[in-house]
Image (tube, rainbow, N blue to C red):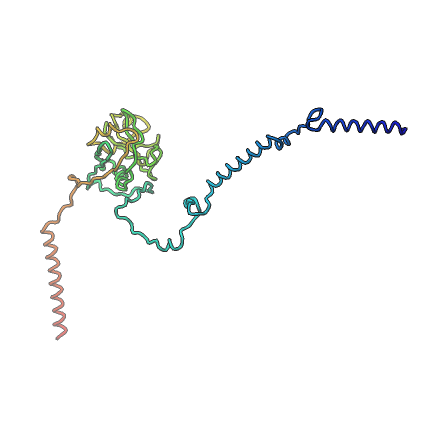
Amino acid sequence: MPPNRRRQRQQQHRGQRARRQRGYVSGGQGQAYKPGFPMNLFTGRAALATFAAVGVVLMVAGISLAAFLPDGGQDADIDELPTVPAAEDAAAAEPTEPDPDATPEIVRNFEFAEFVIAPEAELYTATISTSKGDIVIELFADIAPNTVNSFVFLAEKRYFDGLVFHRVVENFVVQGGDPTGTGNGGPGYDTFDEPNEVHNEAGTVAMAKGSGQPFFGSQFFINLKDNPALDFDAGNRDRFYPFGRVIEGMDVVNALVQGDVMESVTITRAPNPDAPTPEPETEGEGEEEGDGESEDETEAEGDAETEDETGDN
């Protein structure tokens, strides 16, 4: 390329660079340079807003962290820390004697019901205490001894105390005896049906059970009316055999609603006046036995004396 032409091109390039440089100068001719994202966050007012927002976030995070993390000082909540008693505190603690007035813990799970009744010798009633009054139930120990025994066993263990009537169906039954209050609980063992010919009349008490099952647990119901469909002769697959009858407090039964509490169930035992009594021994038999013993002793003494005399000779 000729030297003159090369100089012309160089001059043209210098002029273009000068014009471009003047266009980027603030206040000069042409469009001013504006940085794009994210560099625009760090220039001018945007930078101030960005730094202010970050500072606020860090401050709030620091305050929240300080609130939720105990600092190990005296203000820390000891229940939230994995601490153990100090050695001196443990040594200072003395064993306490059991409180005789403390309410013993109620057990509501058993392997079986111990036999605790004497059906021929005693009569039994159960008193259910509620906030609306007492319900007194005569128990049929003579015709349903195993059912009554299970009920008495649980009542004397205070099993029913504090349980609720979890099911109340108007003009049908009132049901309770479930430790869970759901209708699915029981005592941990089963008792088999004791068929009888007592009808499910108003006020009679029978054990509740699952459909088609010949056994039951601890749930019982009180008939609010005559329910012949539950009877032994109704022809249905499920039959319910009463083991007791309300003799006092049927007005209380009719006033019960779902959720009412059995505050306590108390068993009363009374001698059965119709119980067979053992025949007493006659005086003659005793005297004859006594005379026989005296004669044997006399004969033994006589034999001993004869032996002594023979030995002396």
In this rendered view, identify the residue nearer to me: 169 or 29.
29
In this view, the residue in front, 205 or 39, is 39
Q: Residue at x 10, y 54 (%)?
A: 288
- Residue 219 placement (x, y as % from top left): 30, 34
| Residue 116 locus on image (x, y percent) | 25, 43
* Relative horizontal placement of residue 43, taking residue 276 as reference (left or right): right
Which quadrant, please, contains the N terminus? top right
Front residue of 174/255: it is 255
Q: Quadrant of the C terminus?
A: bottom left
Is residue 12 visible to the viewer in this orientation of the structure?
Answer: yes
Q: Residue furthest bottom?
A: 313
Snapshot quadrant of residue 8: top right
Q: Position of residue 30 (x, y in %)?
A: 71, 24
Q: Is residue 1 left or right of residue 216?
A: right
- Residue 232 visible here: no
Res. 38 image quadrant: top right
Residue at (25% x, 32% y) in the render: 205
Residue at 89% over, 29% down: 3
User: Toward which corner of the image does residue 271 lie, by quadrant?
Assistant: top left
Q: Which x, y percent locates residue 131?
A: 24, 33
Number of numbered discs present?
0
- Which residue occupies the foreground of this view, 283 or 35? 35
Residue lying farthest to the front in this orientation: 27
